[in-house]
Image (tube, coloured by chain):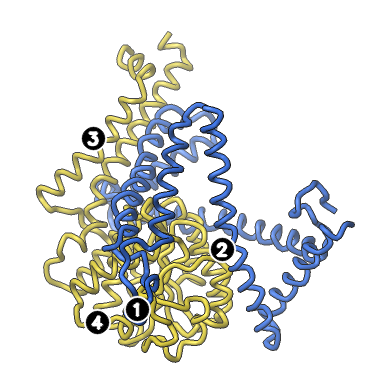
Amino acid sequence: MTLRRMIPMWIAVIGGFVMLLSAFVRPIEGIGENFADAFNVIAAIAVALGAGSLLKVNLSKISRREAGWGFAGVILITFAITLIVGLLKIGVHPSHDFPAALFSGKQETADSPFGWLYEYAMVPLTSTMFALLAFYVASAAFRAFRAKNVEAVLLLVTAFIVLLGRTFAGVVLTGWLPDWASGLRFENLSVYVMQVFNTAGNRAIIIGIALGVAATSLRILLGVDRSWMGGGDSA
Amino acid sequence: MNLLKVLDAIDRRWVFLWMGLAVAVPILWIGLTGRTFPETPTPAARAVYEAIDSLPTGSLVLFAFDYDPASSGELQPMSTSLLRQCAAKGHRIVCIALWPLGGNLAQETITNVIREDYPNMREGVDFVNLGYQAGNEGVMKVALTDFIKAFPVDSRGQAASKIEMLRGVKRVSDFPLLINVSAGYPGNKEWIQYVITSSEGKMKMVAGCTGVQAPQMYPYYPAQLAGLLGAIKGAAEYESLVNQSIGGIAPPKYLEAQRRMAPQLFGHLLMVLLIIVGNIIFFANKRGDLR
């Protein structure tokens, strides 16, 4: 194994074991904390890598005049504006603690240009994107939600119970049921579906995933699985 | 049969239009009349209310805003009510965020609730916004051993170590209650896995999440999660509880979740109708009736 692969592997092995043991052995808690700090530093560096990747992908799209290259231009311009306004803290007042220091204020305040970009560009744009889902879900339900077999029928019935039980429609449709049959009211059936059937299924999935994660983590910690370093060398 | 044939070949833009109307008309109707549907709180929503209410007045509450404006339509009403109940109860609130835009949403919520309706609460003494911190679970791990190190400054740029209400806070488990409103990763699940399970029962957690996440969060209730607000429905139930307990006529900002139940009702009814019609078409096609 080359040093290029050996060093990262040993960092992962040592870091992983220290993080694992620090949860149980008090004396090495501080060392675990140092590794967590290092993780945070690497996470911050990853932001720069992400920005670099964004530039690379969109600049190449523009230079090759690919379909939708104009949108790539919009991305780059808005990225640059937000970055400059945020990094240079344009229009931000210095902090109360350090009034003489030019860049001591926080740029997230509502009255700063960065705050303005957030409030009047970011918020409506992201909210609109999310709201569009309702239209596509409605269209997809109309075209694809078919009672083709027993499983699909069960899914349809569950969907009806949850869709109606999560609104006032459930109360209107089944609110007349007497108390002894209150379990059949849509709002109660919806809670029952979520807390019994859903919980049982999801717990099974969670336990399965946890076992898989534990097994994979152990393979990485023991240096058996090295696929995370890339290059196709899994063992 | 002719109608079914027309519906079978219908352009999806008609479906978009119906959905637009199903959502827009109730919004207009509520805007004009101010009326909302009554809500009956489920045990999970009631448990959230009781977890906050049962804490002694002046308790430290950690409030993590782990979402962004994309899901604020669904989550912001519950954040507003949660912060309102904490403020009304006289708890000291520490806001944090592990999502880049969560810090701004925390600030907005503080402005709308605390600054407008609880002006006697002092920043740094009764509430503070420590803003966003990058690092996801890494931040949680650091907060487990040194909370101030994980969140070193507040939103004003003041050192957290100098903030009065944070004196005596060493670890995240020094907070008796964690409120987490989340739209994904990192969020409810990570807080449970990294913080709540490590706090050895010292810390309770209540959570709010989007409708998509709710099925994944129910397995944690009521053991790891003391209470759970699932999407706008859970928010509406909880909001009605908070409004009842505080009393008086609630201003529109404290009725947002209940106001959103009407568009949700008609949106859901349209979905049910579309699924039924879609299946009638499917079976008619299968029998060859539409040929």
The dot on residue B21 is 3
User: Chain under label 4?
Assistant: B
Q: Which residue is mark 1?
A: A100
Which chain does yellow denote in the image? Answer: B
| Number of the front mark, 4 or 3 | 4
Can you give x and y, in whole percent of width and height, for residue B48 in the image? 36, 70
Residue type (three-letter) at the residue carrying disc 4: Met
- The answer to whether the residues at label 2 and label 1 have Cβ atoms under 8 Å apart is no
Mark pair 2, 1: CA separation: 28 Å
Please tell me in which quadrant of the rendered image residue B14 appears.
top left
Measure the alpha-carbon separation of dots 1 and 4: 28 Å
- Examine the image and state in which quarter residue B119 appears: bottom left
Judging by colour alone, the chain drawn in blue in this rendered image is A
Q: CA distance from mark 2 to mark 4?
A: 34 Å
Q: Quadrant of the N terminus of chain B?
A: top left
Callout 4 environment at 10 Å: few (<14), some (14 to 19), or many (20+)? some
Identified by mark 3, the residue type is Leu
- Give me the chain letter of mark 3: B
Give how far across and how far down residue A204 sits, in percent.
62, 57
- Secondary structure under tag 4 reads loop
Q: Nearer the viewer, residue A171 or A70?
A: A70
Q: Secondary structure at mark 3?
A: helix
Residue tagged by mark 4? B121
Which corner quadrant of the image does residue B273 belong to?
top left
Q: Which three-letter amino acid code belongs to the residue tagged 2?
A: Ala
Crowd rating for badge 2 (residues with CA inside 10 Å; few <14, some 14–19, many 20+): some
Residue drawn at point x = 62 percent, y = 64 percent: A42
Does B34 sit above or below residue B134?
A: above
